[in-house]
Image (cartoon, coloured by chain):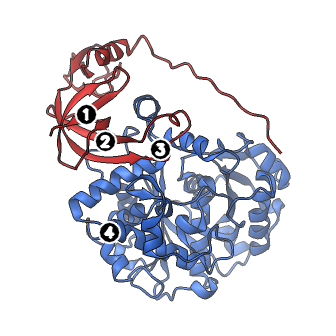
Chain colours: A red, B blue
Amino acid sequence: MDGIPLIMKYTLPAEELYKPFWEGLKRGEILGTRCKKCGTLYFPPQKDCPKCMASDMEWMDIGKVGEVMTYSIVLQKPQGFENFSDYTIGIVRTEKGIDLMCWVIGTPKVGAKVFLTSDGQRVLCKVRS
Amino acid sequence: MNRKVGIIGVGMSKFGKRNDVTVRELSWEAVKEAFEDSGLTQRDVQLTVIGSTAYRGTEIYPAPPVSEYCDLIGKSPLRVEAACATGSSAIFTAVNTIASGLVDLALVIGVDKMTEVDTATSLAIGGRGGNYYWEFQMYGTTFPTYYALYATRHMALFGTKEEDMALAAVKAHKYASYNEKAHFRNRITVEDVLKSRVISWPIKLLDSSPISDGASAVILASEEKIRELKIDTPIWIRAIGYGSDTSYIAARGEWVGLNAAREAAYMAYKMSGYSPQDVEYATVHDCFTIAEIMAYEDLGFVEKGKGTSLLREGQTEKGGKIAVNLFGGLKAKGHPLGATGVAMAYEITKQLREEAGPVQHSFKKYVALSHNVGGTGHYAFVSIYSR
């Protein structure tokens, strides 16, 4: 017997808070936040610095090049991504020492050098040929 | 711990796709068996802790219907959740309630019905097991992907091969074939694993634990209560260590082992006074084959990067140096998230009591360990038991 469906439609919170990040992505820039008081750099960006208890942050570019630390190619997709082609999720370490998740364009290898870019919605990294 | 706590009754339902029952009847299968095993009844229970992630089933608040069905009304049903380590967090809660002196006897129920939603929905729920905003929303991470990221790095750094990982699956299915409560009871070969459908490369279908329904239950009591009840075969919980790590997997800076598991193991060894060399039997959290290899390393059974050697040499088989997952592991026994950690206590109790039938390990010191990871190392519990 079919159960009663539970349809959930979410509205993402903190749209205003992270607006500079989403605007940065549209320009192809990847921004994190840095605490003005103690200098700690955060990626993903965050509003508060739990290390020194301050909440005075500035937006900062986290770099344009990096290295693939690891990756996986997703063939069995989750609900919400059914219509995407197979995609490769990677973890990249940038020149500034920030580790971030991204989609990999090209054929990756652990240790491969990559350029960071964006499709306006997410961080992409392109394997340098 | 202030007071010694022992396991005095265990029960487990058949794991698998259980469309024949709701979460209530499923829980009762395990609870009834635990009562029969201990010779106790609901009257003896002072506290019930229910471990369930619940979200994939129709009952998203399962504690009231389960406790009602099991005739446990008034026994303070409390629900806890720690993703795939939910069962261990439920045991941790009950053990500490007894150790503190608040109650003398508690029942822990681990239960989840995972098959009431389809696979794509289940993957979307599991994919939220990390950091929703900066992972799932942007990249469509699935749970297998998280472990695949570990597998790829382990392969690149240590030369681990897909064939090595497949050995863990072959072992799991071999032992599940003896376990009538296991989800899968078919034997498989390395070839079968390598040829199976890719889910999130390098993880394939047969590298993965199934989406299962299942329940397990344990009854715990203080040393004084155990003496009063004249129970002569308690299994003592010597230590429960715990650890945790970042929700955003990229921030972990290593990806070849789980910091949370290492921290939990360190704490458990220190608390119990035992070392990895003392452990004769272990249940490890093999939700994916790479997880079993990393577990050997994180628990100190072998040095980092050498986990596959134990599999190749058969050291973790029955009769090996440390027998691991002789009931089939999460991989083949099944992995209903809330039930898994409690089922580990069930398995260890059966082994230490020498009630494991065809898969009975032969003990010298009667020291066993369970390793239960939540998320992809977002939480971990390592528990040490002895007879």
* Residue found at the very far top of the displayed protein: A16
Residue drawn at (29%, 38%) of the image = A104
Whether tag 4 and tag 1 are in contact, CB under 8 A, the answer is no
Dot 2, how many residues are within 10 Å of its Cα: few (below 14), some (14-19), or many (20+)? many
Q: Is residue B111 above or below residue B76?
A: below
* CA gap, disc 4 and disc 3: 29 Å
* CA gap, disc 2 and disc 3: 13 Å
* CA gap, disc 3 and disc 1: 19 Å
Task: Determine which quarter of the picture holds residue B250.
Answer: top left
Dot 1, how many residues are within 10 Å of its Cα: few (below 14), some (14-19), or many (20+)? many
Which type of secondary structure does the marked residue at label 3 adopt? loop
Residue B232 in the image, given as x and y percentages of width and height: 67, 81
Task: Check residue B300 in the rendering and tell me which mark sits there, or answer none.
Answer: 4
On whether disc 4 and disc 3 are found on a single subunit, the reply is yes
Kind of residue at badge 1: Cys
On whether disc 4 and disc 2 are found on a single subunit, the reply is no
Subunit ID for the residue under disc 2: A
Of badges 4 and 3, the one in the foreground is 3
Q: Which residue is mark 2?
A: A90
Q: Which residue is mark 1?
A: A125
* CA gap, disc 1 and disc 2: 8 Å
Q: Which residue is mark 3?
A: B142
Residue A58 horizontal side relative to residue B168, left or right: left
